[in-house]
Amino acid sequence: MNPEGKNARHYWEERLSSDFSLAKAGDRRLGLAYNWWLYRARRRALDRSLKALALDVRGKRVLDLGSGTGFYVDYWLGKGAGAVTGVDITEVSVRNLQQRFPKAQFVRADIASEAVGALGSFEIISAFDVFFHIVDEGAFRRHDLLHRGDDVVPRPHELGVQLHLVGAQ
């Protein structure tokens, strides 16, 4: 994903600074129309997953890892999440998302950093197309964000969706 051999932050900072849209966040070879189609398909898959789990998002605390251009932040807020915290490795994402979603909180951090582990507890943690970008798995596992004694229900099999419901019944 990083053909230029740059560090991840620099790579994504540069890529999203030139065009803060799904055209750059998704598969840039296929263009904006295709990426919009793909993200709509992912939204439908996520809707089906939440329905199958009988999960009501309203009022829940959501952590969105790798927020990028905010597609899933918008999704969670639209579903009535009580609080959404987005984490992204780039300043360009955090700056744009703070302007677009003033009711949400955004943090610039590598998702494997201790800063993410210190954010507190969440009832829903989403990480779409993010885990395969982790370059230090040991650091990610050290803060054990996904397993704090609660039930974790992964649904990674539908169109790359990685969703963890922490403490969900």
Image (cartoon, rainbow, N blue to C red):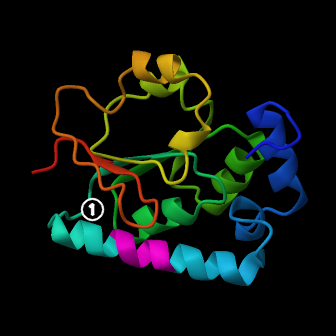
Prevailing secondary structure class for the magenta stretch in the rendered image? helix
Pick the front one: 27 or 93: 27
Where does residue 129 sit, x and y in percent of width and height? 54, 52
Q: Which residue is mark 1?
A: 57
82 in relation to 1, above or below: below
Q: Is residue 44 magenta?
A: yes
Which residue is depicted at the point 46% across and 60% down? Answer: 160
Q: Point out the stretch of residues depicted in magenta.
A: 41-46
The image quadrant of residue 157 is: bottom left
Residue type indicated by callout 1: Val
Q: Is residue 47 magenta?
A: no
Residue 156 relative to residue 95: left or right: left
Which residue is depicted at the point 50% across and 62% down? Answer: 72
Mark 1 is surrounded, within 10 Å at the Cα level, by few (under 14), some (14 to 19) or many (20 or more) other residues, namely some
Where does residue 64 sit, x and y in percent of width and height? 47, 48
Which residue is depicted at the point 35% across and 23% down? Answer: 144
Which residue is depicted at the point 51% across and 59% down? Answer: 73
Q: Residue furthest left?
A: 169
